[in-house]
Image (cartoon, helix red, strand yellow):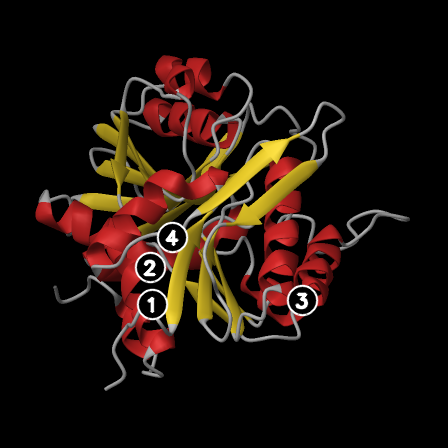
Amino acid sequence: MHKWNDDEARLFSLSASNELAEKIAKHMGVKLGKLSSQKFNDGEIQINIEETVRGRDVYLIQATNYPVNDHLWELLIMIDALKRASAKTVNLIMPYFGYARQDRTAAPREPITAKLVANMITKAGATRVLTLDLHTVQVQGFFDIPVDNLFCIPLFAKYYGEKGIKGDDVVVVSPKNSGIKRARSLAEYLESPLAIIDYEEDDKKREHGYIIGEVKGKKAILVDDILNTGTTFYAAAEVLKNEGVDEIYACSSHGVLSNNAKELMDLSPIKEITITDSVEIPEDHIPRQLKVITASHLMADAITRIHENEPMSPLFTYGKNR
């Protein structure tokens, strides 16, 4: 088996993912590479790699959350720098892929920005992408390089299972009809029933939601991929409360928590909100009931498997039998 060797491979982190990168490096037993980054007065970004990468397999960790465009340009500039420094491969570790929701033309004359970003990453010189819970799995097909998309549901299933929140007394709820597959997956892990919240077509304010499934007297777990403004969870929690749910939990792969999400979640009847550490959250954006579980061990295992040319398939049920 091919083991990690600093003379053959290096792990780097950019500004958006320093905390997660340090955890990943600790799990792997390796050190993060040295680099410096600065922004000029006009907004230009300059990056300098402070050690040799010639002939090495490089693994670059960077999420593209807020400010998404700064982080995206940091990433593209770093990829270019690595290629010009003669890195053997540039493997991009992207815990959160910004722009993934712009994956289709929902209205006339709209761009497919997720495809544009995929093209930019590929053109810059990345040779592989490892990401965590894409908004839609079809985004993998926007890249012309290999993409491994890991899932967070097994991590949440392990967390709730260890707390005893599982079985027939629990119902897993999709807060919108587009998230049924994700909710069904968690329900199967927890051996719990599934419910769906839907809204009338003209109910843009989500004031008249209705539930498909039985929830009264149960503990409910709302599940979504991105917690952004918090409006989806807030509206769904209100519907569940009105239907007589005993306790409401929520989990989301990516805690973007923009705008007034904290205030909205603080006001909601949700007992606990669980997210991964794919995105670093400012202290003043953290809701009172937030619980963060790490995805670092999952991503560390994936990086090691990529480097050692081992199959990735065991990671797609990560945590199920651990």
Whole-angstrom CA distance, mark 2 to mark 3, is: 21 Å
**Which residue is under mark 4?**
183
**Which residue is under mark 2?**
299
Give 299 or 136, whichever is nearer the viewer: 299
- Tell whether label 2 touches label 1 (CB within 8 Å): yes
Give 307 or 248, whichever is nearer the viewer: 307
Quarter-of-image position of residue 163: top left
**Which residue is under mark 1?**
302
**In x, y percent, where is residue 84?**
65, 64
Q: Amino acid at mark 3?
A: Thr
**In x, y percent, where is residue 223?**
38, 44
Q: Residue at coordinates 36% horizontally, 23% vertically from top-left?
A: 242
Whole-angstrom CA distance, mark 1 to mark 4, is: 24 Å
Q: Residue at coordinates 66% horizontally, 44% vertically from top-left?
A: 73
Quarter-of-image position of residue 272: top left
Q: Amino acid at mark 1?
A: Ala
Q: Residue furthest bottom?
A: 1
Badge 2 marks a residue whose secondary structure is helix
Whole-angstrom CA distance, mark 1 to mark 2, is: 5 Å
Give 19 or 266, whichever is nearer the viewer: 19
Q: Amino acid at mark 2?
A: Met
Badge 4 marks a residue whose secondary structure is helix
Q: Amino acid at mark 4?
A: Ala
